[in-house]
Amino acid sequence: MSLHETPTRVSASRDCPVIQGQRQIQRISSREADVGGLPIHRAMPTRERRTIGAWCFLDHAGPSILRETVDTRVGMKVGPHPHTSLQTFTWMLEGEVQHRDSLGNDQVIRPGQVNLMTAGYGISHTEASLEHSPRLHAAQLWIALPHEHRHTQPRFDHYPVLPRWNLDGADLTLLMGEFEGHEAPCLSFSPLVGMDISGSNNPLTLPLREDFEYGILVLEGSVSLDGDANEAHLATDELAYLGMNRQQLDLQLSADSRILLIGGEPLKQDILMWWNFVGHSREEIIAAQRDWEAASERFGSIPDWPGERLEAPPIPWQQS
Ligand code: MN
C-alpha cells in the first residue's frame, strides 16, 4: 500500500483545535484512494493530521465483496514495492491476504490476526487476496521508526493470537501495547497502543494515558464520543483526534459497530514520507528511491511474482 502525494514533512503532533477556550475533538474525514485495484479509505496522513503517536498512515479497506469492487480474476494485488524506516501493521477482519517479502517470508493473514513487517533499512513485499476469498475487510497502518531504529534489521512477524476480552458487553482486542493489564505481543519501537472495539450498545469508559495522544477511526457503524465536555458523533471512516492529557474517554457504539483506537507518545522528531518510504532527511528518501530504481540488493526481490515491480513516481523536489 503506498502514498502518492506531494512529499510531506511530518511535524511533531499538535493538540486538538480550541474554540472559545474549549478543546474540541478534531474530526477528520477519510479520503478515497486506490490500492492494488481496491478502493480504500485513507484516514492518515491528511492535511489536518499526519501522525498519532508513531502511527503515520491509516488505510481502511472494505468491508467489501471483492467481485463488486475489483476484477475478480485479479482480486487485490499489490506488486513488489519497498519500504524503509517504518513498520507495516495489518489487522485483518474478513478475508485472506497473502504476504510475501524479500526475506523469504510467505504468510497468509486471516481474520483476527496481525501481520507486522519491520522495514528498517529496507525490505520489499507483495500483498494479494486469495482467490477463494471473496470478501475483504482490513486496516493497514504504518508506524514510523524512531531515528535511532530507522535503519534496524528488517524482519517480519505474524501474530495469530491477540489478547481479547469483554468490557461491559463490548469485545476488545488489543493490537499493540498495553491496556488494563493486557499486553499485546506485537513488536514496537516506541510507546504505542492499538485496540479494536466492537459490539456493544452499552456506554463504555476507557482509561487513557495523559502522555499519549489518541485517535479513533470508525470501521463499521457509528460511535458517540464524550471527552472533557465536548462530544462528537462519528460515522464510518471518520477519524476523531483526541489529543493528549485526557484521563478517560466515554463512548457509545451503535449496534453492529466497530472502531479502532490508536495512540502513543507524540513523535519526538520530524519525519518525511514519500511514496512507500519514511525518512528522517531528504537525503535518506532520495537514497531509498535511487536504490529501489537501481534494483539494489538493499530491497531484495520476490521470486516468481507474476508481474512487474511497482515504479516510484519521480520526487518533485529532487535536484537533478
Ligand atoms: Mn506495503
Image (cartoon, rainbow, N blue to C red):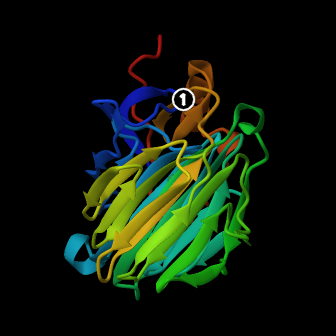
Residue 91 position, x and y percent, is 52, 69
Of the pair 293 and 153, the residue shown nearer to us: 153
Q: Amino acid at mark 1?
A: Ala
Q: Is residue 2 above or below residue 67?
A: above
Q: Secondary structure at mark 1?
A: loop
Find out if the beta carbon at label 1 lies less than 8 Å from the nearest ligand 1 atom: no
Q: Indicate the quadrant where residue 296 lies.
A: top right
Q: Indicate the quadrant where residue 253 lies.
A: bottom left
Of the pair 253 and 124, the residue shown nearer to us: 253
Q: Which residue is mark 1?
A: 12
Q: Is residue 5 above or below residue 270?
A: below
Of the pair 100 and 204, the residue shown nearer to us: 204
Of all residues, the one furthest to the top in this rendering is: 319
Residue 294 in view: no
Residue 215 in view: yes
Of the pair 238 and 242, the residue shown nearer to us: 242
Residue 10 position, x and y percent, is 49, 29
Residue 189 position, x and y percent, is 73, 47
Q: What residue is drawn where x is 40% and y is 41%?
A: 45
